[in-house]
Image: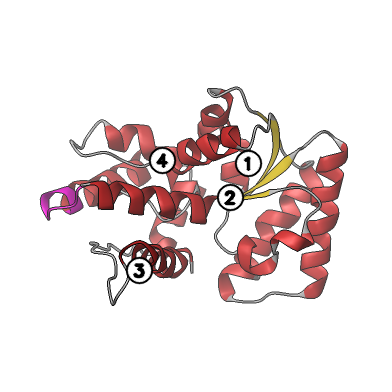
Amino acid sequence: MPTSIYYKTLNQLTNQQLGSAHSSKLLLYSVDFEEFSSLQNAGDLDAAGKMLSGIAIQLENAGADCIVMCANTVHLFADSIRQRIKIPLLHSAEETAKEIVKQKINKVALLGTKFTMEHPFFKDRLSQLGIDTIIPDETDKDYIHASIFNELTKGIFKDETKNKYIEIIDKLKSCGAEGVVFGSAEFSILLGPTDCSIPIFDTIAIHSKAAVDFALSK
């Protein structure tokens, strides 16, 4: 589902800027998520990183001007991929951090898979621009992670899940969060801006806009 959301968003944003019947020019490599997640869950991060780096090289050789990875979790490997390619890799967290700074927000809650919430690859990018990040407690992290894979990625969106997310976000707000980062593509389907008591930073929308801006500046 994340890839389809990116694809739709990239085309919509391109058409908004160029008008008429324009759409985005892109090379798409669809990764078998089971292959990737099996390596990740087994702790074989070297093999997962090599697989993604190899794909990036293939896209570069096919004529891509930049690399956009259509999920936040895979940005765990962004630094190693950058070392192996000559074209830019547009980093989701870096683009999100820029947008948070524009909104003059200093502390955000981060929601996503446990990999995104727990590993430093996303939080460190925010920290580099002076943004503090807080994440849910262990129980809420487990709930969010399970709901992503058992419901949201399968196109299942329940009111009870939506209400639980709102409860978690309100809890993080009480801990000082001034905004919430949606680190999974499906969150923006489950929740809208009016559902949250603090501003939403949708990484998919932000990342896609950065990619379109880059492409149209070429």
Image point (52%, 41%), residue name: 96
Q: Earlier in the sequence, mark 2 or mark 1?
A: 1
Magenta-tinted stretch:
59-66
Kindly state the secondary structure of the residue where label 1 is placed: helix
- How far, Cα to Cα, is label 3 from label 4? 23 Å
CB-based contact (under 8 Å), mark 2 and mark 1: yes
Count of numbered circles in the view: 4
- How far, Cα to Cα, is label 3 from label 2? 25 Å
Amino acid on which disc 1 is placed: Met
Q: Earlier in the sequence, mark 4 or mark 1?
A: 4
Residue 189 vs 44, above or below: the answer is below
Q: Earlier in the sequence, mark 3 or mark 2?
A: 3
Q: Position of residue 12 (x, y in %)?
A: 41, 68
Q: Which residue is labeled 3 in the image?
A: 15
Residue 19 sits in quarter: bottom left
Query: What crowding class fits label 2: few (fewer than 14 Cα within 10 Å), some (14-19), or many (20 or more)?
Result: many
- How far, Cα to Cα, is label 4 from label 1? 16 Å
For residue 40, say whether it is visible: no
Q: Main secondary structure of the magenta part?
A: loop
Amino acid on which disc 4 is placed: His
Query: What crowding class fits label 1: few (fewer than 14 Cα within 10 Å), some (14-19), or many (20 or more)?
Result: many
Residue 91 - label: 4
Image point (29%, 75%), residue name: 20
